[in-house]
Image (cartoon, rainbow, N blue to C red):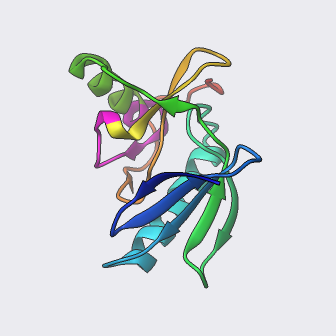
Amino acid sequence: MREIKDSPRSLVRIGYDGRVYKTFRGKHAGERFANEVRILRLLEERKCGYVPRLLEADPETLSLVTTNCGQMAQKMRKQKIDRLFAELERDYGVRHDDPFEKNITYRQSDGRFCIIDFELAEDTGEPEKAPEAKQ
């Protein structure tokens, strides 16, 4: 496995199978784990096509496995970043609460910017408009 992030809050690796493996640790790890699982399930239910899909979640080890949404985005303009996170909230009713470039990836297969890392996100309720499945 290739290590992507090793911080006091989490360890993130990409497996040889292309999946993303995240283990939560540190202060409030259980709460952050539960929140990310809840938000990813909500976004899948709302058919958001530009976030990872939750494949496994283990509350005993505070770890989860998701699909991979591409490579880390680099050198994005603030306007583009703000627009992407605003779209998530408007169309899917989720406020990210950590809206920075470090939480955006680029999925080369369809040329789509994706959003990752939902441990601080919150459900704002129903989206402003009911979107069709977006990529």
Q: Position of residue 39 (x, y in %)?
A: 51, 55
What are the residue bounds of the magenta stretch? Answer: 88-101
What residue lies at 37% left-to-right and 54% top-to-bottom? 121
Q: Quadrant of residue 89?
A: top left
Q: Is residue 96 magenta?
A: yes
Instruction: Answer left or right for 23 relative to 103.
Output: right
Give the quadrant of the N terminus.
bottom right
Residue 134 at x, y percent in the picture: 61, 24
Residue found at the very far bottom of the displayed protein: 60
The answer to which quarter of the image holds residue 28 is bottom left
Of residues 6 and 105, the one drawn nearer to the viewer in this rendering:
6
Q: Which of 75 and 47 lies nearest the eye of the viewer? A: 75
Percent position of residue 9, x then y: 36, 67
Residue name at image x 29 percent, y 40 percent: 99
> Hey, which residue is sitting farthest front in the picture?
2
State the residue in front, 66 or 50.
Answer: 66
